[in-house]
Image (tube, coloured by chain):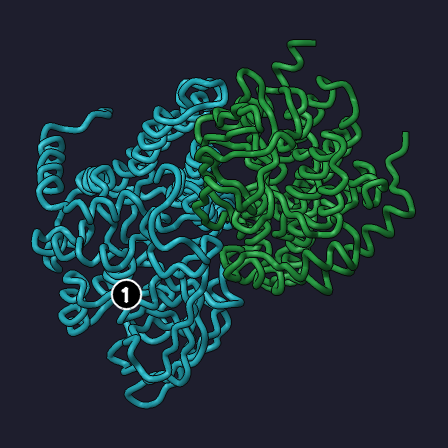
């Protein structure tokens, strides 16, 4: 057993730091550091992606032959930590992390040749069409229909919770091509040009007033069969593959540590209930310490998962355990942010941060009162409530683990 | 011992609830909150003229209904359930209590009853965190009256009220002063709050006031006023939580996944049981606080701080789980629980966070 990074890994970290110091503009740094949610705004994300593309660092998890970095899991972990610490915005995960792996694993040569380079360059900005009104946790019950019409599939239905669909030019969808005994059968993984006739994107406004998610209506949208990834009817396999592609490569602890650093710094600048600095307030200091302790445990848990995955071992409960603990800690840390914000945490000032989409609630156009950290705190707190709901609610994740435990 | 409401109180609750459902339903309320002014003048007039509710706590000699704290609690809870944005708490609870305690302010109390006067409570400062009795804003006696200098933060309703109730320091004592919103030297920076209300940071630059602007003097008078306000805020929270619990139960009975209503899943049933339990305990804490408002200062303050800690915890638990159990729908502006959740979040820290009141409770307990 060895918990420390190797000399090569530390050298890699220094290389990453040097790159970030050289390439991150102040504007990009601010756009990553002042996000009002976990989502970057598409404009800044694409500008940063262009810089990464030049360096060949857009897709840490992809194989080199498709334009990936060929990094080890440890290198990917280091990259993620350094990127967040430097305040760089995240590249949209919908293309590189979600659709890309599906095409790499199950796509045709023609699909790989056409889509992967455009995904890396950012020419194609992707969105996801999975959930439906009646199919959230029970995703396999989805009803959006694709009828066979010779060389085309004709798609009719409705999709929900599509992040940045309003900014996307391509979408990957799960559609139903057949109704069979098991709901997982008869689902097809389909790539749809968002400019196709019959595609309508309607904004969903979040409780924080931001339009990041969208509803997508599909009305007899004609999609060439050459856009089917994998076989018709085999979409569930493709969807599962893409979920497993990044196994061992995801980590919450780096971001959580940076969050806590920020909160501690802020708490050193504002007053606490006992008249001194907030960071010297015993109750607040205890809450920060507890969060740090919990993140330390999670960090080693993530190291262990990474180490297992590097050796080709993938304990089934790990992704669910990580999702539950990671999102619960994310949420608790937004509560600490809000606590630190004090009374200014009541003010609605999205303009003090960088929203990932148009803001629909009334707000001042420019300028804000109080510290920027306090203005961002309630936005993060409200937005982060989604973390225990999206990508399989934490209740569903616990059901999955219970099943794996043989209960 | 008796925790039942009188027939009059039941009637008051029913009349108010019916009126608000008709006149200030969820879409009407949200439209007012998102209008340019951020409130509804016609609703305010209706509360005064149709219901006489704005004077519920004002003495009959001043034209009010002469109601007691329990009447005010009933009204506050219903206004919470309606998610009313207009400044009832600031005007008819805080304003009426301050003017009533000052004595001899019948004309102003009558203006509260008629709806002509709207108040905002300017107590918080950037450096005072949640302590209401230690303002840095200076009130200086000028011989002819007062001069105020200072800055107040997140003053709810300030952009559209007629008067500000301002805490300030006169040498070493806190005081409360009544300031007309159009006074010279007063400037506002306006913005909305996360629960859809309007607020402002208010700068007092040599604002000059007549002698009669002074309403209250001394730490106990300010603490008492804040305790009354906090108790009624707690009552409002009960209404907010009631709607979140009811909506969550209704939604989970209707929403089907895996071939059955999600309310049939035991893990969600237990969650809703805990939401119910938290609401009931919060209700109990509010009753103790409201029934202690006329008790000795230390007993009153302990009951109110205990209540605020209990209510803040309940607001967080019920609010977060109302969103969680609504699933993705909870994360949209379409469902009303997302609006109630944000109000509950503001209530958590308004007039002091759970940490602040836990500390106050502990200090008061040690002093006994």
Is B76 in front, or is B310? B76
Image coordinates for residue B263, horizontal then vertical, percent:
65, 54
**Residue sitting farthest toward the front:** B144
| Residue A145 visible in this rendered orientation of the protein | yes
Q: Residue at x 78, y 22 (%)?
A: B295
Image vertical order of residue A17 relative to residue A67, above or below:
above
| Image quarter in which the C terminus of chain B is found | top right
In the rendered image, the vertical position of residue B116 relative to residue A187, given as above or below: above
Q: Which chain is cyan?
A: A
> Colour in which chain B is shown?
green
Residue B28, percent from left and from top: 62, 64
Q: Which of B44 and B309 is in front in this view?
A: B44
- The quadrant of the rendering that contains the N terminus of chain B is top right
Image coords of residue B24 (percent x, y): 67, 61
Per the image, the residue denoted by label 1 is A126
Residue, x 50% and y 30% (percent of image)? B148
Residue in the image at 45% along x and 64% along y: A204
In the foreground, A92 or B175: B175
Report helix, strand or loop for mark 1.
Answer: strand
Residue depicted at 56% across the width and 47% down the height: B157
Where residue B336 sits, quadrant-wise, is: bottom right
| Observer-nearest of B228 and A393 | B228
User: Outermost residue toward the bottom?
Assistant: A150
Q: Which chain carries label 1?
A: A
């Amino acid at each position: 057993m060895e918990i420390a990074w190797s000399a090569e890994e530390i050298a890699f970290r220094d290389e990453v730091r040097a790159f970030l110091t050289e390439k991150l503009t102040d504007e990009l740094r601010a756009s990553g550091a002042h996000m009002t949610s976990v989502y970057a705004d598409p404009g800044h994300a694409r500008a940063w992606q262009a810089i990464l593309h030049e360096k060949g660092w857009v897709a840490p998890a992809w194989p080199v032959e498709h334009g990936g970095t060929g990094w080890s899991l440890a290198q990917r972990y280091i990259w993620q930590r350094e990127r967040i610490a430097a305040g760089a915005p995240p590249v949209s995960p919908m293309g590189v992390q979600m659709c890309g792996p599906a095409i790499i694993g199950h796509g045709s040569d023609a699909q790989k040749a056409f889509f992967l380079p455009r995904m890396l360059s950012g020419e194609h900005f992707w969105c996801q069409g999975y959930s439906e009104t009646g199919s959230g946790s029970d995703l396999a019950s989805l009803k959006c229909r694709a009828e066979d019409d010779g060389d085309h599939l004709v798609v009719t239905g409705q999709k929900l919770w599509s992040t940045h669909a309003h900014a996307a030019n391509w979408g990957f969808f799960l559609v139903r091509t057949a109704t069979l005994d098991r709901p997982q059968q008869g689902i097809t993984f389909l790539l749809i040009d968002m400019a196709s006739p019959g595609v309508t994107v309607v904004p969903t406004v979040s409780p924080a007033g931001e339009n990041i998610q969208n509803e997508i209506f599909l009305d007899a949208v004609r999609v060439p069969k050459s856009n089917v990834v994998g076989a018709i009817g085999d979409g569930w396999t493709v969807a599962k593959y893409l979920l497993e592609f990044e196994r061992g490569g995801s980590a919450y602890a780096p971001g959580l540590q940076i969050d806590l650093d920020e909160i501690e710094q802020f708490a050193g600048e504002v007053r606490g209930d006992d008249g001194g600095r907030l960071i010297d307030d015993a109750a607040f200091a205890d809450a920060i310490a507890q969060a740090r302790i919990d993140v330390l445990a999670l960090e080693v848990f993530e190291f262990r998962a990474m180490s297992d995955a590097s050796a080709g071992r993938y304990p089934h409960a790990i992704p669910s355990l990580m999702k539950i603990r990671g999102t619960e800690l994310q949420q608790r840390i937004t509560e600490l942010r809000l606590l630190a914000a004090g009374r200014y945490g009541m003010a609605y000032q999205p303009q003090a941060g960088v929203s990932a989409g148009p803001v629909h609630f009334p707000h001042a156009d420019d300028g804000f009162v109080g510290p920027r950290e306090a203005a961002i705190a309630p936005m993060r707190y409200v937005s982060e409530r989604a973390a225990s709901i999206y990508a399989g609610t934490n209740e569903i994740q616990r059901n999955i683990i219970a099943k794996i435990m043989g209960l | 011992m008796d925790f039942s409401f009188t027939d009059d109180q039941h009637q008051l609750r029913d009349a108010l609830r019916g009126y608000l459902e008709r006149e200030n339903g969820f879409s009407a309320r949200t439209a007012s909150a998102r209008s340019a002014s951020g409130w509804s003048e016609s609703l305010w007039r209706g509360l005064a003229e149709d219901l006489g509710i704005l004077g519920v706590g004002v003495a009959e000699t001043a034209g009010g209904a002469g109601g007691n704290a329990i009447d005010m609690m009933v009204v506050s809870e219903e206004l919470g359930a309606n998610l009313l944005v207009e400044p009832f708490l600031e005007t008819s609870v805080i304003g009426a209590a301050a003017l009533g305690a000052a004595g001899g302010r019948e004309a102003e109390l009558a203006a509260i009853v008629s709806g002509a006067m709207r108040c905002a409570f300017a107590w918080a400062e950037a450096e005072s965190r949640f302590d209401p009795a230690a303002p840095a804003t200076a009130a200086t006696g000028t011989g002819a009256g007062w001069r105020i200098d200072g800055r107040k933060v997140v003053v709810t309703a300030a952009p559209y009220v007629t008067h500000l109730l301002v805490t300030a320091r006169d040498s070493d004592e806190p005081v409360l002063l009544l300031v007309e919103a159009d006074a010279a030297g007063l400037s506002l920076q306006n913005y909305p709050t996360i629960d859809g209300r309007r607020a402002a940071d208010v700068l007092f630059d040599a604002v000059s006031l007549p002698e009669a602007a002074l309403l209250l003097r001394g730490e106990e008078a300010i603490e008492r006023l804040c305790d009354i306000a906090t108790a009624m805020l707690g009552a409002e929270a009960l209404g907010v939580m009631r709607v979140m619990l009811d909506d969550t139960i209704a939604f989970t009975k209707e929403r089907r996944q895996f071939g059955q209503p999600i309310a049939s899943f035991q893990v969600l049933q237990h969650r809703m049981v805990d939401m119910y339990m938290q609401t009931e305990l919060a209700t109990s804490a509010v009753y103790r606080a409201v029934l202690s408002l006329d008790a000795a200062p230390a007993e009153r303050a302990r009951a109110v701080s205990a209540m605020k800690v209990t209510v803040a915890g309940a607001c967080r638990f019920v609010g977060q789980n109302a969103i969680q159990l609504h699933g993705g729908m909870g994360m949209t502006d379409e469902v009303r629980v997302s609006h109630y959740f944000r109000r509950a979040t503001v209530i958590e820290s308004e007039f002091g966070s759970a940490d602040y009141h836990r500390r106050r409770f502990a200090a008061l307990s040690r002093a006994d």
